[in-house]
Image (cartoon, grey):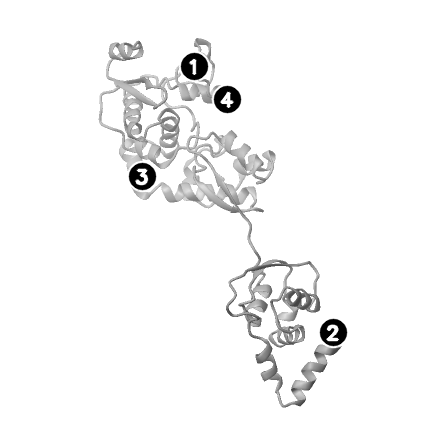
């Protein structure tokens, strides 16, 4: 009955002297040009132009269903209209609404995803799984053998599944982002942050990318205060240059798989290439994802004669720095 009435109205208008073009123009404007409202419209899969016109009319987004269908046919959009969730407004004219639905300009639901500085790969994987970005098995497979188009990828050892190269940052992803897209975005951020000057600096230090990211990851885990990062870096650089073991608690915690507040003698004696209490030099690969400040500290350490540091204030996270073992012991034994 409604459809018949609508056709009668159009027929009367046409008989009254309105051309088809004038008719479409009269009914193709916005329902309410002053509206600031956004209406969420869901078009189910398989819905044809007739059904879409009904949905839009009921939501108060078009003036006339028949005019909508006629314009859809004239523009060729009638066979291109796509299902999905749309944000439309009564202030939109018919052409704008048709174009949005034909383009599939659907509402994109996004989520924030934060990787804190100093997060180990295992914790990043756990966060991805919890956020719905794939299963652990899917993520691990991509980390091991996924193809990524970044120059730095040619200079790192994939054995370590990109540990240290998933850049810590707060990201915005689509809710249905794939694990590959999430990992690729984090790698892209690392590629942006690690500037050309940093690569030049690698040559000056006679270090490769994997080594500097490994060192930066240790600095990230040891430092709490930004102003101390370059000082901590100087201690490790001085030790590396002198052939002295790094003796970083963070590397042992990485092997243990837990961040123990205090390590035992048994802990620091654990057998692992990552144990810098047991073996000199850097561990085989990064132990966490370092932020840019730690990368910069590793690349540009302070110029000091320090070989030791020990916690000064647990709450503040500050340290004493010393050139000699005797001074180090004195500070270690302070009340």
Q: Quadrant of residue 223?
A: top left
Q: Residue at x 70, y 63 (%)?
A: 47
Q: How far from the left and from the top, in percent, is residue 154?
A: 43, 39
Query: Tag on residue 2?
Result: 2
- Element under label 3? helix
- Element under label 1? loop
> Which residue in the structure is indicated by mark 4?
257
Q: How far from the left and from the top, in percent, is residue 83?
A: 65, 60
What is the number of callouts on the image? 4
Q: Decide which of 311, 219 is in the foreground and name it.
A: 311
Circle nearer the viewer, 4 or 1 = 1
| 106 relative to 207, above or below | below
| 150 relative to 54, above or below | above
Circle nearer the viewer, 4 or 3 = 4
Whole-number angstrom distance, CA of label 1 to CA of label 2? 78 Å
Q: Crowding near pointer 4: few (<14 within 10 Å), some, many (20+)?
A: few
Whole-number angstrom distance, CA of label 4 to CA of label 1? 14 Å
| 252 relative to 25, above or below | above
> Which residue in the structure is indicated by mark 1?
262
Which badge, 4 or 1, comes first in the chain's sequence? 4
Circle nearer the viewer, 1 or 3 = 1
Query: Tag on residue 27?
Result: none
């Amino acid at each position: 009955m409604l459809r018949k009435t609508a056709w009668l109205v159009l027929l009367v208008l046409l008989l009254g002297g309105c051309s088809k073009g004038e008719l479409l123009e009269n009914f193709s404007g916005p329902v309410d040009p002053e509206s600031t409202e956004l209406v969420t419209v869901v078009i189910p899969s398989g819905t044809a132009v007739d059904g879409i016109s009904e949905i839009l009319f009921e939501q108060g987004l078009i003036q006339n269903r028949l005019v909508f269908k006629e314009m859809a046919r004239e523009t060729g959009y009638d066979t291109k209209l796509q299902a999905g969730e749309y944000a439309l407004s009564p202030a939109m004219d018919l052409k704008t609404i048709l174009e949005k639905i034909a383009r599939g300009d659907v509402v994109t639901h996004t989520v924030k995803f934060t990787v804190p500085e100093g997060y180990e790969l295992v914790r990043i994987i756990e966060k991805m799984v919890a956020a719905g970005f794939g299963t652990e098995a899917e993520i691990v497979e991509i980390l091991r053998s996924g193809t990524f188009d970044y120059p730095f990828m040619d200079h790192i050892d994939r054995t370590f599944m990109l540990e240290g190269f998933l850049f810590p940052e707060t990201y915005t992803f689509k809710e249905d982002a794939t694990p590959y897209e999430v990992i690729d975005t984090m790698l892209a951020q690392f590629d942006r942050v690690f500037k050309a000057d940093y690569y030049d600096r690698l040559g000056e230090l006679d270090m490769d990318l994997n080594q500097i990211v490994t060192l930066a990851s240790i600095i990230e885990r040891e430092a709490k205060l930004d102003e101390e990062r370059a000082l901590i870096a100087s201690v490790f650089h001085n030790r590396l240059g002198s052939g002295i073991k790094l003796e970083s608690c963070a590397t042992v915690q990485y092997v243990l798989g837990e961040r123990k507040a205090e390590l035992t003698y048994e802990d620091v004696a654990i057998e692992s290439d990552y144990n810098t209490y047991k073996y000199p030099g850097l561990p085989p690969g990064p132990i966490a994802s370092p932020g840019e400040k730690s990368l910069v500290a590793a690349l540009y350490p302070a110029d000091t004669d320090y070989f030791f540091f020990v916690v000064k204030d647990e709450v503040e996270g500050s340290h004493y720095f010393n050139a000699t073992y005797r001074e180090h012991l004195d500070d270690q034994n302070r009340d």
